[in-house]
Image (tube, helix red, strand yellow):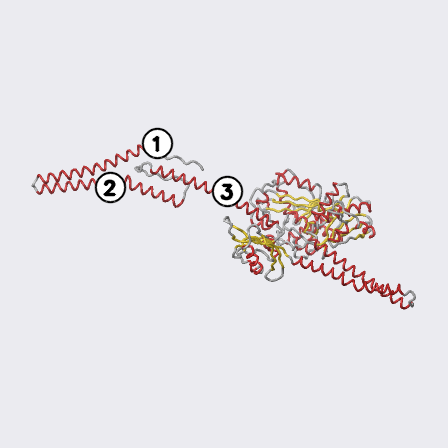
Amino acid sequence: MPRSEPIASTAAPRRRTGVAQRQLAIAFGAAAAAAVALIVTLVVLQADSDGAAAANAGWTAAAGLAAGLGVLWLILDWRFLRPLARFAAGARFIAETHPVGRVTLPEHPALGTLPEAVDALCRRLGAVEREFGDAVAAATGSVEEQKQRLEAILSDLAEGVLVCNLDHQVLLYNQVALALLHLGGELGLGRSLFTLITREPILHALELLLGRPESDPALAIVAATTDSSTLLTGRMSLVRDATRRPTGYVLTFNDATRDIAEHARRDALLREAVEGLRAPLANLRAAAETAAAFPDLAPERRREFEQVMLREAAGLSDRLATLDHGYQNLAAATWPMADLYSTDLFSCVARRLAESGGPRLTITGLPLWLHGDSHSLALALEHVARCLARATGRTSFDLEALLSDRHIYAEIAWDGEAVASPTLDGWRAETLAGSVGPVTLGRVLERHNSEMWSRETRPGRAILRMPLPASRQPALRERGGGKPPARPEFYDFDLLALTGGHALDAAPLRTLPYVVFDTETTGLRPSDGDEIVSIGAVRVLNGRILTGETFSRLVDPRRTIPVASIRFHGITDAMVAGSPPIEVVLPQFRDFVADAVLVAYNAAFDLKFLKLKETASGVRFDNVALDALLIAAFLFPDLDDLSLDGLAARLGIDITDRHSALGDAMATAAVFTKLLELLERCGVDTLGQLLAASRMTFEIRARQAHF
């Protein structure tokens, strides 16, 4: 605790006190003189019998006494009562408002050292209050830190968690609990647990827990949701206060509906294997024993037995195939799996191959979400890539995730011939290096209810496909509870290289290297101080999106990001804090672009931000630039919705991670590769032809903007 200042004890307060004492002595002296005068007057009156003189002397004495008392009152009021009133007002102000200051001393310090003492007391009280406030702030910060840790732990748990008081009101929950209880949004703190979960199992478990010793705190519980749609299994334990008195309980639970259904399916499969095969085997055995016991049977009778054996054998084969399919589904359902981002999985495989001297994988296409065991899938894809290298003699392959109605295809493509089915069957039986236990490629495929096949897509080009389960997560919702407003169209002739006359004009469009990019910004006015907060880009070559060659950076804009912009792209001030400024990021982006053709959707907007920062960053973007929006307007002049989302939906492109710089660059790249195919069909094959078409479209839309 800080030491308080000592009460003032200098000579000045003593001098002021002495003056006040002398003034007070004078006042009392005047009053005493008046009293003496009155006494003398009374004595004189007794000695003098003259009544008039006595009366005059009496009035004179009374007037003197009154004057002395009046002077005494004025001195008391001026030197003591008024300073005390002002002093009391200052003390009351401090008591009511707790200012960080000192007591205002009265003009006439007749009160001695009392103001200094109270002032020192107030300052000491202020120091104690500040120390108490600091302690409360530190404790609050510690509690908030513990709360954040608890929230992080709860969010990472695979189980649902509910904390309730003894009145069965929900005090705390995690997101898994919402999913298991099939609730969207918020659960609602203070809500009764019995509106979510059946009452009787909870009350019974709580009664048992309250009767148990503290050394046996947890109890298994089985309950159901109130609508009986989900069966829950879990554990309940008590929450106790500092005196060990129960104040509530914690309920952790999982959805047991699927487990019970899988057990039922497993039992049905086993029962079918036992009961379903009994009769066909008995018939087959009886027919075979009869044919063997009577070798002299007539040919027609023997043929009947042979037909019975053939029919039953075929039935057994079909039934075994059905059982095998059911077993594969069960194996796939019970193996621990999770949603995976295809880029993460494929990048891991490509890195492992590169580090071990294997074939080179080029990741292409849009990233997609799939569902599976990431470790075994990585080993399987690595093994298949090595097998393909041995079988085809190729040292490089393309790897892409493709979306179908029910699956995500992992497709490996190469220049050459397809691989024969017997060769693929041989690979299925091979053990995967690095697996936990002797796991074969075929076993991994069975876990994922998958297979693989190879075929030629065109002469000299072949693929190998593996269908994998699609993600089980619903489509991502837009940030902010609604769809952000679309970015308006920007046209700036000086920013777009639409004039032709370039050295690349005669180059075929498909052979050019492209960098498709996007920016997220603080606003829509680059010339009025808005800044870049993120840049994302991906390389496109030979009509392929090179998913493994991307650029993604957050940028410190050195200004506050408006709420309206945060709603659009989700980037906050806290996210960009500590990120490099644009003067550092832009040279890195220029190195990534190199001599590629720049492509963006509504490109004038993004290019304007780059151009305004060229001098500060010391780089120039003099590359040819294409606007995918203008290309789309050229190909679809009558289409009303030319937004990126609308065009992607029309072209059958599934977009994820929208309104992030890299996500929008990926989406634009997917649209751009489709547009390149359509341009070739329209006879636009070279860069010069495309620039001419873009210029014409640019002029038309620029004129339309004036009407």
Of mark 1 and mark 3, the one earlier in the sequence is 1
Q: Which mark is residue 138?
A: 3
Residue 205 image offset from top left, x and y in percent: 57, 57
Q: How far apart, in angstroms, are the residues tagged by discs 1 and 3?
A: 39 Å
Of mark 2 and mark 1, the one earlier in the sequence is 1
Task: Quickly name the residue at label 1.
Answer: 10
- Residue 166 left/right relative to 436: left
Q: Nearer the viewer, residue 386 or 435?
A: 435
Label 1 crowd bin: few (<14), some (14–19), many (20+), radius 10 Å: few
Query: Which residue lies at the image location 26% right of the left edge and 34% below the top edge?
Result: 22
- Residue 83 left/right relative to 234: left
Q: Quadrant of residue 78?
A: top left
- Residue 492 left/right relative to 91: right
Query: Which residue lies at the image location 80% right of the left edge and 61% below the top edge?
Result: 318
Residue 338 image offset from top left, x and y in percent: 68, 51
**Any part of residue 682 in sight:** no
Q: How far apart, in angstroms, are the residues tagged by discs 2 and 1?
A: 30 Å
Q: Quadrant of the C terminus?
A: bottom right
- Mark 1: amino acid: Thr
Query: Which residue lies at the image location 74% right of the left edge and 61% below the top edge?
Result: 271
- Residue 57 left/right relative to 549: left
Q: Secondary structure at mark 1?
A: loop
- Mark 3: amino acid: Ala
- Mark 2: amino acid: Trp
Q: Quadrant of residue 114?
A: top left
Judge depth for marks 3 and 2 and give the one in front: 3
Q: Secondary structure at mark 2?
A: helix
Q: Quadrant of the N terminus?
A: top left
Q: Nearer the viewer, residue 98 or 120?
A: 120
Task: Quickly name the residue at label 2.
Answer: 73
